Image (tube, rainbow, N blue to C red):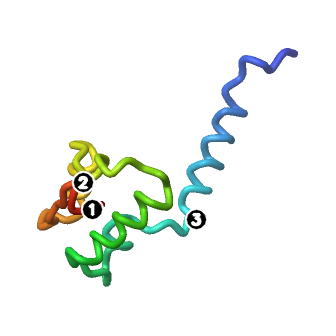
Amino acid sequence: ACHDRSTGNLGRHVKGCVHAQDNTNQLTVAQFARGSTYTHGKLRTKQVRWVCESHRPFTIVEDAGYRDICTMLNSNVKFVSRQTLS
């Protein structure tokens, strides 16, 4: 008998995937952020390091998408210009 069209294997695979996801040790953003503090100076230092080490253009700190992500993580974020960062 041909079992290539059976969904049994798929069902077992899905059950294994769901079980595997339950055992992850990854933190949610809220769990990760708990205990960390935001300071404007710390963010500026991290931005400078990121831009330099990853060879990013200084203009990336003015990118709308980047700013949207920062605001999502901390609504009180203070943005710097590319001139300030350089």
- Give how far apart the Cα atoms at labels 1 and 2 are: 5 Å
Amino acid type shown at disc 3: Asn
Helix, strand, or loop for circle 2?
helix
- Circle number at residue 85: 1
Label 3: how many Cα within 10 Å (few below 14, some 14–19, many 20+): few
Label 2: how many Cα within 10 Å (few below 14, some 14–19, many 20+): few
Helix, strand, or loop for circle 1?
helix
Amino acid type shown at disc 2: Arg
Report the residue at 31% width, 48% height from top: 60
Label 1: how many Cα within 10 Å (few below 14, some 14–19, many 20+): some
- Give how far apart the Cα atoms at labels 2 and 3 are: 42 Å
Pick whichever, 10 or 70, lies toward us: 70
Pick whichever, 25 or 73, lies toward us: 73
- Name the spot of residue 68 as percent of width and height, x first: 21, 49
Report the residue at 54% width, 69% height from top: 25
For marks 1 and 3, give the one nearer the viewer: 1
Amino acid type shown at disc 1: Leu
Pick whichever, 52 or 28, lies toward us: 52
Report the residue at 27% width, 52% height from top: 61
Residue found farthest to the bottom: 35
Using the rendered view, name the quadrant where residue 39 is placed. bottom left
- Name the spot of residue 57 as percent of width and height, x first: 37, 47
- Give how far apart the Cα atoms at labels 1 and 3 are: 41 Å
Q: Is residue 80 left or right of residue 43?
A: left
- Circle number at residue 23: 3
**79 relative to 35, above or below:** above
Helix, strand, or loop for circle 3?
loop
For marks 2 and 3, give the one nearer the viewer: 2
Can you say which quadrant of the picture contains the C terminus?
bottom left
Q: Is residue 79 left or right of residue 18?
A: left
Mark 2 lies on residue: 82
